[in-house]
């Protein structure tokens, strides 16, 4: 018997999960699936790589498949995501897990023609996965209606906030029926997200699977201190000497991603860049080639990398450290999944030592340093950087001070009575055992 059937999922879904190679639920799945099946609201604090998508998608499929489709084929579930890549990845999961049901799904986002999307909406879909902009565009054209939504999922709410979608979120919520199930997931909880959750959720079950600064234990992290002018040469050296394939490299800017991909190509390393300025078709092709192992290096910005979900991605490299320390955890969380170890290297210049210190404070430990002969940052350069006036050093960007509070806080004006049902987790397996993260579905 599948362990997923013990969570209350029907045989058709358990069969689809098993065919994907998953037997053991991850901690968030073990807690969220039974809670969502009851029809109540849920507030989840979860990093990438925890199996969050299956945690909400499997019970939604189960609930929708258990009752006849209403007359008129209305949209019954809405999943809202910050990026096109994440939306596409979720819709792919819906198709895989719902293959033995009669439920239909559609993903809509900008950057591609809207007419095919409108045509599919006219035929009727049960589950809609969308980004805010295109969803509001089509709602404004009366190409879709959201007044029959039974379950609303807000995924990666903190990233929505970072991308400036808070007003769009409130507009979308205003189009939904008052009676519905709400599921909100976020890795961090700044005040705006807490306020949003308090107004959206009614007596939610609360699940927290890892603290904000926790880094996965299956990731071997290393820091290479290197002169800024030698970063590209060091990156080429590491990839060629290690014979690395499927390497995900993070840069801070779109221009930097383009330039680095071009430089790697000139060094005979197949590479492509993805970021917000690339066409959707170009981004889709690059991601498909990378996931299939046909592309050696993918250079990405933080936003474009959302939705990259490869269970055995072996290498992540921070070519430039992020301005926000929490983003470091998001980045390296792309590797070390499904019980398979991964490596994460950070190439750190003298002007990034302040950011490195902020990241290590968040992690609660120092990241091991490694020395690569011929590339090591000199003690003189480090001393010069530390002696520079504060205004000349690159400083990390902090999120609002309250981002470490536990999800939800104590609602001051909830639609319910403010009580929550607590489901504790930490980093334990269901049943209290420790060890590598179970390889549950993503």
Image (cartoon, rainbow, N blue to C red):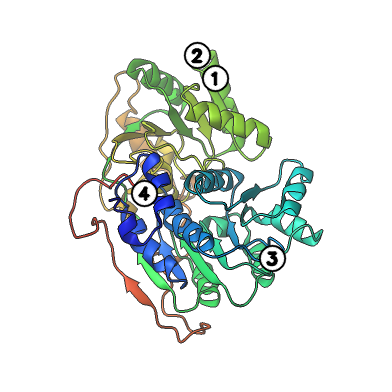
196 sits to left or right of 3? right
Secondary structure state at the residue bearing disc 3? loop
Residue 154 picture quarter: bottom right
Secondary structure state at the residue bearing disc 1? helix
Crowdedness near tag 3: few (<14), some (14–19) or many (≥20) residues, C-alpha within 10 Å: few
Crowdedness near tag 1: few (<14), some (14–19) or many (≥20) residues, C-alpha within 10 Å: some
**Which residue sits furthest front?**
68
What residue is shown at x 59% (from left), y 57% (from top)? 80
Query: Which of the two marks, 3 or 4, is nearer to us in this view?
Result: 3
Query: Which of the two marks, 2 or 3, is nearer to us in this view?
Result: 3
**Could you say which is closer to the camera, residue 103 or residue 147?**
103
Residue at label 3? 71
Q: Do the residues labelled 3 and 4 touch (CB within 8 Å)?
A: no
Query: Which of the two marks, 1 or 3, is nearer to us in this view?
Result: 3
Q: Counting residues from the N terminus, which is met first, the one under dot 4 or under dot 2?
A: 2
- How far is disc 2 from disc 3 in space, using C-alphas? 59 Å
| Label drawn at residue 64 | none
**Which residue sits furthest right?**
141
Residue at label 1? 263
**Could you say which is closer to the camera, residue 70 or residue 372?**
70
Residue at label 4? 359
Crowdedness near tag 2: few (<14), some (14–19) or many (≥20) residues, C-alpha within 10 Å: few
What residue is shown at x 28% (from left), y 36% (from top)? 341
Residue at label 2? 267
Residue 354 point in image, percent of width and height:
39, 46
Residue 121 in view (yes/no) = yes
- How far is disc 4 from disc 2 in space, using C-alphas? 31 Å
Residue 53 point in image, percent of width and height:
46, 52
Residue 147 point in image, percent of width and height:
69, 70
Query: Which of the two marks, 4 or 2, is nearer to us in this view?
Result: 2
230 sits to left or right of 366? right
Q: Do the residues labelled 2 and 3 touch (CB within 8 Å)?
A: no
């Amino acid at each position: 018997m599948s362990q997923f059937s013990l969570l209350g999922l029907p045989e058709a879904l358990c069969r689809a999960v098993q065919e994907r190679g998953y037997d053991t639920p991850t901690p968030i799945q073990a807690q969220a699936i039974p809670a969502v099946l009851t029809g109540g609201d849920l507030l989840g604090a979860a990093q990438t790589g925890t199996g969050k998508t299956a945690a909400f998608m499997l019970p939604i499929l189960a609930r929708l498949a258990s009752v006849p489709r209403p007359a008129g084929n209305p949209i019954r579930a809405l999943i809202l995501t910050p990026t096109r890549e994440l939306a596409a990845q979720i819709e792919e999961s819906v198709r895989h897990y719902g293959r033995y049901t009669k439920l239909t799904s559609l993903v809509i986002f900008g950057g591609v023609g809207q007419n095919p999307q409108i045509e599919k909406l006219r035929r009727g879909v049960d589950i809609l996965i969308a980004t805010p902009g295109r969803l509001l565009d089509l709602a404004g054209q009366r190409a879709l209606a959201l007044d029959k939504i039974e379950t609303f999922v807000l995924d990666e709410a903190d990233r929505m906030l970072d991308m400036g979608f808070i007003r769009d979120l409130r507009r979308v919520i205003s189009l939904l029926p008052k009676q519905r199930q709400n599921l909100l997931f976020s890795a961090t909880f700044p005040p705006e997200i807490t306020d949003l959750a308090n107004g959206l959720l009614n007596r939610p079950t609360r699940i927290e699977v890892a603290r904000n600064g926790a880094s996965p234990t299956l990731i071997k992290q290393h820091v290479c201190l290197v002169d800024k002018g030698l970063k590209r040469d060091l990156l080429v050296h590491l990839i060629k000497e290690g014979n690395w394939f499927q390497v995900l490299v993070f840069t801070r800017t779109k221009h930097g991603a383009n330039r680095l991909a071009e430089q790697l190509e000139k060094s005979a390393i197949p590479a492509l860049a993805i970021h917000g300025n690339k066409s959707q078709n170009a981004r889709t092709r690059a991601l498909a080639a990378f996931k299939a192992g046909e592309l050696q290096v993918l250079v990405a910005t933080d936003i474009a990398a959302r939705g990259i979900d490869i269970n055995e991605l072996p290498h992540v490299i921070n070519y430039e450290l992020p301005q926000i320390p929490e983003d470091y955890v998001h980045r390296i969380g792309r590797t070390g999944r499904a019980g398979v170890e991964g490596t994460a290297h950070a190439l750190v210049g003298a002007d990034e030592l302040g950011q490195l210190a902020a990241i290590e404070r968040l992690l609660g430990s120092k990241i091991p340093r490694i020395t690569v002969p011929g590339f090591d940052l000199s003690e003189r350069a480090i001393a010069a950087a530390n002696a520079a006036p504060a205004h000349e050093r690159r400083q990390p960007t902090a999120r609002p001070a309250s981002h470490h509070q536990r999800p939800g806080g104590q609602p001051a004006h909830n639609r319910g009575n403010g009580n929550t049902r607590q489901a504790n987790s930490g980093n334990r397996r269901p049943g209290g055992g420790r060890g590598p993260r179970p390889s549950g579905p993503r």
